Image (cartoon, rainbow, N blue to C red):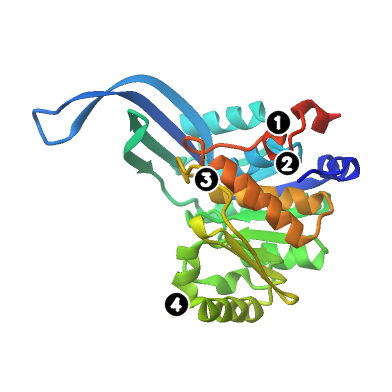
Amino acid sequence: MKLQPEQQQALTQCRLLVVGDVMLDRYWFGDVSRISPEAPVPVVRISRQEERLGGAANVARNLSSLGVATTLLSVVGEDEAGHAIERLLTQSGIVARMHRDPGLDTIIKLRVIGRQQQLLRIDFETTPSADVLSGKLASFHALLPHSDILLLSDYGKGGLRDVADMIAAARAAGVPVLVDPKGDDYERYRGATLLTPNLSEFRTVAGSWQDEADFRRRADNLRQKLDLDALLITRSEQGMTLFTASGVTHQPAMAREVFDVSGAGDTVIATLAAMLGAGLAIEDAVAWSNRAAGIVVGKLGTAVVTPQELWGEPDSAIAE
């Protein structure tokens, strides 16, 4: 697989607006050599710490890594973690439009890693206030006219309260809308261009199925019910399946070795948006997303795919 020069140029000229729940992923790495005398748990002696962008910020980071001009709109707290997210966004070349909520604790996911195995994850989170979300919606309407594609990354943390209004505004403006959904109420995503639930998320809204034919019937029913152009269901080791009015396309999984699935969905939807921005047909864009997923699950934690990994070109070739 290879991108043509004109497609690479279109990709770098496309303007992506990402809206959603951002979080700070913190990793504490250490060695485990004994069990605690206080409880039957391992004692981890921390030797290294890392901070990475998570949630919608990881989606934006994946887009920026592929050379796409990316703006991220979200809410953070007036705290150290919020400042850390803004710093990391700047370092990744992402235009950050962060609304600060003094009463909000910026979402943090702290993972403790021992001997390359995740031993524990601790989450810190609260819900943004209505006033701050209203201000963010006003910013959204100001940014939308300058965007070619809208990507909504919903992690169910309250930052996409106005998702239905955003989808309606984008479709009225002729801007495609890609959504990574969450929860059991998909009605609020009605009218989106594309939804990308994973298998578990799809089961929550569609119910269990008896066989592959039943699975496909339920998926296409959901696509039609929500007035979607396309529905892409990611199926882990089974690959991913795309449903459109034209039919069903399946991509088998390409991962050689699965090390960590954290953030794989972020990479899938980011790559999909990037390839649509490059002018590819939806079926071809899905094939690229499947390839990107196979690469990123071989990395530890939330990670990105580079142009060199994805289509074998030096990173500099994309920036030229």
Residue at 64 percent of width and 40 percent of height: 62
In three-dimensional space, the C-alpha distance between marks 2 and 1, rounded to whole angstroms, equals: 8 Å
Which of 130 and 268 lies nearest the eye of the viewer? 268
Counting residues from the start of the chain, the first of labels 2 and 1 encountered is: 2
- Residue 6, position in %: x, y? 91, 43
Decide: marks 2, 1 in contact (CB < 8 A)?
Answer: yes
Q: Which residue is labeled 4 in the image?
A: 207
In the depicted structure, whether residue 125 falls above or below residue 115: below
Q: Earlier in the sequence, mark 2 or mark 4?
A: 2
Residue 231 drawn above or below residue 101: below
- Return the disc, 1 or 4, that comes first in the chain's sequence: 1
Where does the image place residue 231, in percent across and percent down from the top left? 64, 68
Kindly give the residue lying farthest to the top in the view shown.
Answer: 47
Task: Tell me: 12 left or right of 193.
Answer: right
Residue type at mark 1 is Gly
The residues bearing labels 3 and 4 have C-alpha atoms spaced at a distance of: 25 Å
- Which numbered dot is residue 93? 1
List x then y, in percent, for residue 139: 70, 49
Q: Residues within 10 Å of mark 4 (few under 14, many from 20)?
A: few
Q: Quick one: quadrant of the C terminus? A: top right
Q: From the viewer's side, name the closer residue of 150 and 234.
A: 234
Determine crowd level at label 2: few under 14, some 14-19, many 20+ residues with C-alpha closer than 10 A: many
For badge 3, the amino acid type reads Gly
